[in-house]
Amino acid sequence: MSATTDRILSKAVDGERLTPDEGLALFACRDLHKLGRAAHQVCLRLHPEPYRTYNIDRNVNYTNVCAAVCDFCAFYRKSADADAYVLPREALYQKIEETIALGGDQILMQGGMHPTLKLEWYEDLLRDLRARYPQVNLHAFSPPEIWHFHKLNKLPLRDVLRRLKAAGLGSLPGGGGEILVDRVRTAITKNKALTDEWLEVMRVWHELGGKSSCTMMFGHVETAADRVEHLTRLRALQAETGGFTAFICWTMQPGHKMSDWPEAGAFEYLRTQAIARLYLDNVPNIQSSWVTQGAKIGQAALFYGANDMGSLMIEENVVASAGTVHYLTLDEIKRAIREAGWEPRQRNVFYQLIEERPVRPGGKPRDRELPVLN
């Protein structure tokens, strides 16, 4: 097994594409350091620059009302629930202005799949935010949300995406991917986009000239073969469209109906990220998931294939609802990068470097960042 693993790792380090069988063989390897060293070599080949990146954005959940039922999600509510909400525009304005004050250039705006809000509501929202804050990228609406818009409004998917893009949608987040295997998706979610539907949203968005991230949430009912199939589907779509800017993976944070599910832990997180870097040879960037793993493991991820520390994440509600979320200040993110031996550089969602803007008076992050406004 060791000789086989070494051959596969050498192949990946040399830039050759791994087969699904080879990817599965790596998941049988328990030598974390060996996997990490190879992933780090690939990362250094792709990113020899003397810096590692981060961005400043805010995860704004404009509603928690959702027609889907995900066993792992403690965030969603039904319309009749007492704590169901749709954020008023004034609350959104405040959140965006606080983000700008902290040097941010992006809003990651996601919600549930609201059963009654029509496409015109979303278009009006995007136009309003784009007119008020033209400097802020609207990184919004996961593929399951987009697919829901398509079904609810009985409009072609391409028309939905074209209209949202015209209204101001800047890029798509890769949320709602979980594991792109229908057996897994139907086991843990209901009324949510299946694998081909998730991928089709991304395909059409890329064909319209858009960019997006892609993700994987693992450590639940999936097998190692399912993880490889997920990565294979992402790699195939990237070969077709070239629209993915980055990959982010994280372990499921047990919550809701899966509250007794054992956590996968840091070992499995680092191992899976390293294998993803080796396997996704055409996805340029890998983000660390310190939000779910904490500062030290998030920093260690820079030696297991990641070249980016992800976002300051001024606000996070979905993972926090499951009871597990970590908070870092901007200075702590920069320090983690420096301690690992690189220069910290701010970037935008398209991985273009941007000049760091000074924090405005009154814009200093507090210990647990900014309050959640419901």
Image (spheres, rainbow, N blue to C red):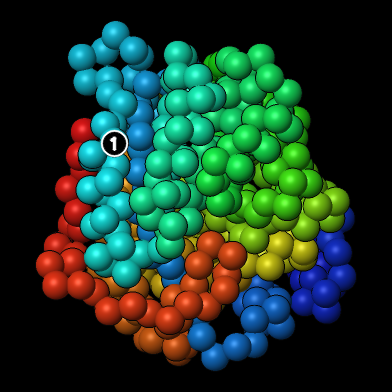
Question: Where residue 35 sits in the image (x, y, percent)?
Answer: 65, 69
**The residue positioned farthest toward the top in the image shown:** 80
Question: Where residue 233 sits in the image (x, y, percent)?
Answer: 77, 44
Question: Where residue 249 sits in the image (x, y, percent)?
Answer: 55, 52
How crowded pointer 1 is (Cα within 10 Å; few <14, some 14-19, many 20+) is rated as: few
Amino acid at the residue labelled 1: Arg
Residue 139 left/right relative to 8: left
Residue 41 left/right relative to 175: right
Residue bearing the label numbered 1: 89
Element marked by disc 1: helix
Q: Quadrant of the C terminus?
A: top left
Q: Looking at this view, is 246 or 150 the one in front?
A: 150
For the image, the number of numbered tags is 1
Instruction: Say above or below: 182 vs 49.
Output: above
Q: Quadrant of the N terminus?
A: bottom right
In this rendering, does residue 23 appear at all?
Answer: no
In percent of the image, x 38 and y 79: which residue is there? Answer: 356
In percent of the image, x 62 and y 52: which residue is there? Answer: 212
Question: Where residue 239 sits in the image (x, y, percent)?
Answer: 84, 55
**The residue positioned farthest toward the front in the image shown:** 131
Instruction: Say above or below: 152 vs 227.
Output: above
In percent of the image, x 55 and y 41: which residue is there? Answer: 167
Residue 126 left/right relative to 13: left
In percent of the image, x 65 and y 54: which residue is there? Answer: 211
In this rendering, does residue 343 appear at all?
Answer: yes
